Image (cartoon, rainbow, N blue to C red):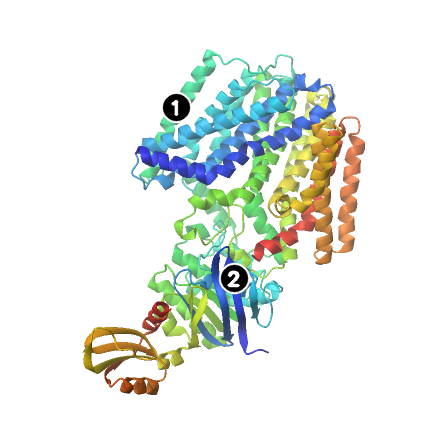
Amino acid sequence: MHSIIAALTWEYVARNRWMLLWLPLLANIPALCILLPLKSISPDDSFMTSPLLIGIQVTVLLSLVLVVCLGIISTQGSSRRLYRFPISTIQITSYYFWTGALLVGAQVALVLWLWKVLLPIDWPIASPVVFSVVCWCALQPVVRGQSQSLWWIVLAILIVIALSFWLLIRHGVPFQQGGMLTSQVHYWNVISITDWLITFFSIGLAYWLTAIRVTYDRSGRSNMPLLERIQLALERLEARWFSGSWNFRSPIQAYSWYDLRHRLLAIPILVFLGVLVSWVIAGLTAVIKRDPGTLIGLAIGGTYLSAVLQVYMALLFGALSLFGKYLVRFEAPEHKLKKSDATPFEHGSFFNGLPISFKDKATALVASSAMATVICGAVLLLSYALIGVVAWAFGVCLSNVKFLNHWKYLVSMNVLAMVLTFVLNNLKFSIGPMLWRIDHWFWSIILAAILVAFGQPAGICVSAALCVFVLVALTASTIQSLMKADIRLGTALGIWGIGTCLAILGWYLFRDEFGPVGMLLLAPLAGLSMLPFFSTTESIRRAHTS
Amino acid sequence: MSDFVIDIQHLGRSFGKTQALQDVSLQVPRGGVFGLIGSNGAGKTTLIKHILGSHYAQRGWVKVFGLDPVAEPVKVLGRIGYMSEDREVPSWMRIGELIDFTRTFYPAWDSGYATELTSVFELDVKQKIRDLSRGQTARVCLLLALSHRPELLVLDEPSSGLDPVIRRDILTAIVRTTTDEGRTVLFSSHLLDEVERLADRVAILHQGRILLDQKLEDIYESYHRVTLRFDRSSSVAPALEGSMHSDGNGKEWTYVYRGQKDQLLAASSQLNATVIAESPLSLDDIFVCNIQGH
């Protein structure tokens, strides 16, 4: 038995060595995208010690735990692949449960330690590690031994919400007007006896439930009958509603519809669920507290959190589209191992046989990415509009809601989330192929070396190098797409014009808030959002014909 | 218009150190059924991917309908009906959705024919692909490949892993495609009884090389199995020029011979041997002889 577990551990590490390396790095990116501009806003680092940072810590920590847990779940795959081995159900459960808990704890500790090294922040490490391990364990009964039902997402969200309350309470959030912005809020520095009791009780209960679920699943018994029945009923309704015909006007429209449904629709759905849950929590809390201000404050916070969530989901999906083949290699049925390279977010061999031009396919993919982003934006906008209506109806003065004092930050973060989502939605075909080209990095490395030689700060060197990299990649892609007639000159000029105007507008609006690093980072962001229009066709051409 | 739907000349392809295709030249004439046979890993799917434009030719060239499938994929793929070996279609779609989705890409899509096939294959358009059996999925793929009435139907291992009923559906579709409409079918298989029943012309691919490319009737005419009786007993088979395989002992030896029959008789008389038995070779025997002889 011991040798089987050892072999499985070896297989897991060998299969996921790159993903395990990438995961903490990927988990860093969005948080650093928030924290680095904040650092540049206050050159004297005063903001990094402000109480507002506690709220950001909670947000970032929740997102970090989510990314790491989902990443480890993806790398572990289904427990079903172990059922054919001569090992007990308890061993299977333990193997997934404890190794995952260990990895989640270690990765969260590593990422937090990295932030403490890179940034002048004094965030605790021990309590977030304990919290992340409890989150991991609490999710196990839901994700292990699940059937084809996707309802586990709903359960998982409920569990995460329940745990989030624990996190908020331990940060001293009073759940009344002001919420995270009151002076009572503090870091979770001490792990109390109650915390340990909650931890041990949650882990014990989660382990017991996970073992039951895996036992049921191994014996082929349905272990989520109620949810499966709900899903079946919904599918029957959908089948009745579905008339049996879709009339697509063009291959672009059809392909765009497919890509949206297959790859990207989950992001707006999750954003919608996030906003909905926020409103429910805000509504219930406001009723208990009899305070409309609480409703507004929590709804704003929840909507903002949903905007952050969309970036994380886009990042996760983007990462899966780039590295997913490493994940499915062991998961795929044996007969498919050599035949298919399709990842959960890729398009398989059937689509390579369809007569659609590379240009049309690229247009469809960019359109579906934009559509997913627009739907997310519409959901967020609707929520903010609703906040305005509710505030007007209850006579709450919005300028008294503390979070809105930072309206510029709120607006810019939402816009940034939209742009980042669009960029990440196009990671596979527009940005991914650019990353591996040394000729695109050449000038960035030269510039960074010159800046370092002249003693410039690291932030300036990195952001300037990134700026040059994106500019080179964008220019090369534009020239290539024009030479191959993938895009018309007028369209190319239009995209460059709009992108440049948006970058200049960003610089103008935030000239006082953003430091030089923030200003330098705006340009590559604008460039990255323009890149899909020029590079996707060529990337698809290369991917199609190997 | 060229007489050949597919024209491949000196095609070479390698993946790292593996030579998947070596100097492959193949011409598939317009009309009829072309069977591509070979053992696992022979290079059949790689060859088909070149025909579909999913692989560019590292050496040599590929023309389909006189066009380069890599340079002009839309013009080529629009005239091809393709069923892949893995039969991978989006599992979350309903059959009706998949049909509606696919028809958008083919201006020549025949909705009446698609409806007819849906009925013949007993498919429910409201059913999700993920709920289908392997055989039903194969039927859906076949429907999608046939409904735009392609000039060239490319089937990669269409019967692999399927029960006899579904295999019959596929074979009927092949026959119907060619006989009713005079179109071309290229199908790869290692189920040689199917190839024997359907193909007009057969090519054997082995380790990336074409070992044989002939009309089926010519193949049968050029392969013979004879049992010869010699004057003297021998522990090893006497060398018969043109033989591919020998088996026996003592004075009686059975040979598989490739060539004209009169040449066989001449060669055996030179060895003072007499033909005591003669039996036809199946495609299976010919395939095995070619593979072993290589």
Q: Quadrant of the C terminus of chain B?
A: bottom left
Res B187 quadrant in image: bottom left
The one nearer the camera, A470 or A315, is A470
Dot 2: chain letter: B
Q: Relative to A311, does residue B119 appear above or below in the rendering?
A: below
Q: Which residue is mark 2?
A: B13
Q: Residues within 10 Å of mark 2 (few under 14, many from 20)?
A: many
Q: Relative to B193, does residue A322 appear above or below in the rendering?
A: above
Q: Which residue is mark 1?
A: A205
Q: Give the residue type that dot 2 points to.
A: Arg
Q: Secondary structure at mark 1?
A: helix
Q: Relative to B72, does residue A74 appear above or below in the rendering?
A: above
Dot 1: chain letter: A
Q: Secondary structure at mark 2?
A: strand
> What is the x, y in percent for residue B194?
37, 69
- In the visual, does B282 lie left or right of A464? left
Q: CA distance from mark 1 to mark 2?
A: 57 Å
> What is the x, y in percent for residue B151?
53, 71
